[in-house]
Image (tube, rainbow, N blue to C red):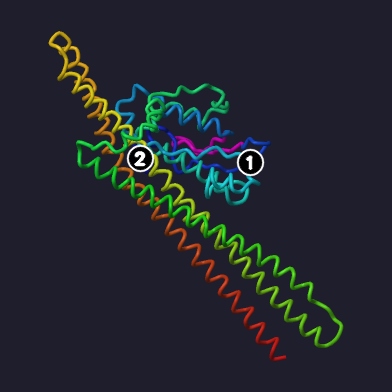
Amino acid sequence: MEVSSAEAALSVSASSIRITDVTQDGDVLTFALTSQKLDSSAGVCVFRIYEDFDWLQQSLFSQENLPGLQGIIFPPLPSKALPSQSNTQTKALKQLGFLALGQDWQSYCKALEFYLQQVAAHPTLCKCKALDSFLFNSESPGKQRGRKGIFNRLSQAVEEMRKESHKDVDNFFQNERNKNTNLAALSKVATEKLLDVVMTEQKLALACGHFSTSLHLCVNQDDASAVAFSKVCLKLSDVIEAVKRNLEKVASNNLSTLGLGLDLESRYQEAEKEMLFRRTCKLIELETVKKGTEKAKANKREVLEAFQKAVEKEFNLISSVAKQEIERFHSSHVNVLKNFLIGWCEVQLNTAKEFAELYSQHLEACRNMYSE
């Protein structure tokens, strides 16, 4: 079987990376992580906490000797989950969105799993030695202090809002920045709207559960009329219980498919935005150096011209890497979102068929009850 260059460099199949279990101890979540090397049929299992994931991300950012590092769209690592805040739904939703919902942190585990798969599938990032250590070493790497690296130093410049509106010298990147600004806003709104839908479905399911239970309070055997009325209440309770289960299943489907897809899309749009901003910062630096060189006195011009060439070379390399990243980003993430949409349609269609059959059975039971 043919393997990608990314997998060959990493010596592991990206698709084999799985988070199979999670345990909670206070505010600490421990994830069981399995993967399989390409040259072995045996799997490897290690245990990781969030600080280990953060160490890996910092290690990816810290490859300062890697040419064009600032042009890479880094797979976005989800924010840290704080289980102690899980009961405070507003805080949890603000922090994690869809990833705060679901049972036993399943959505959060899926997001972390997908993050690792994206890093392992990346043609450049997969070569980082830290990834191999993260996947196969039994010792937790999160205790090591990661260096912040050039990425973080540049990220501090996000506060300089004026740079975000700086006009680009390359129409390709200017158009990409405009497109990214629109898509980032739209994907964020779409994610928030679907989250509202899921929350409403869960609230309706809870209300149906209360209603179904309360109908049992109407049951009594005092006389024939009471018995007949009790039968109606019990049958209606069964119907409302079915509606409740349907709402729960639909909400769960929304969460595990389209919800995760939109959450990932929204975070990736932000990751692309950060990359484009880093390139803009380098562009502004280059333009500033050029202006300084033009105004420099003759005795300093030679040194400044050499510095300008170095900055220009770095900027061109970042731009070259960024173009490749953008093309790869559009190609891969259209497919990823398409797969989430297809999965969403399939599970919702299956759910609709399942409960349509169940409702038909309840309808037939009601007809038989009234014909008696």
| Amino acid type, callout 2 | Lys
Q: Which residues are magenta?
A: 30-46
Q: Which mark is residue 273?
A: 2
**Residue at position x 48%, y 30% from top?**
56
Q: Residues within 10 Å of mark 2 (few under 14, many from 20)?
A: some
Location of residue 51 by image quarter: top right
Q: Which SS class for mark 1?
A: helix
**Residue at position x 27%, y 30% from top?**
318
Question: Residue 45: x percent and y percent?
Answer: 57, 35
User: What residue sits right under mark 1 in the picture?
Assistant: 83
Quadrant the C terminus occupies: bottom right
The single residue placed furthest to the top in the displayed view is 299
- Image side of residue 312 versus residue 30, left or right: left
Question: Residue 152: x percent and y percent?
Answer: 41, 27
Can residue 39 be found in the magenta stretch? yes
- Image side of residue 7 versus residue 139, left or right: left
Report the Cα–Cα distance between label 1 and label 2: 30 Å
The single residue placed furthest to the left in the displayed view is 298
Q: Residues within 10 Å of mark 1 (few under 14, many from 20)?
A: some
Q: Note whether 75 is above or below 67 in the view shown.
A: below
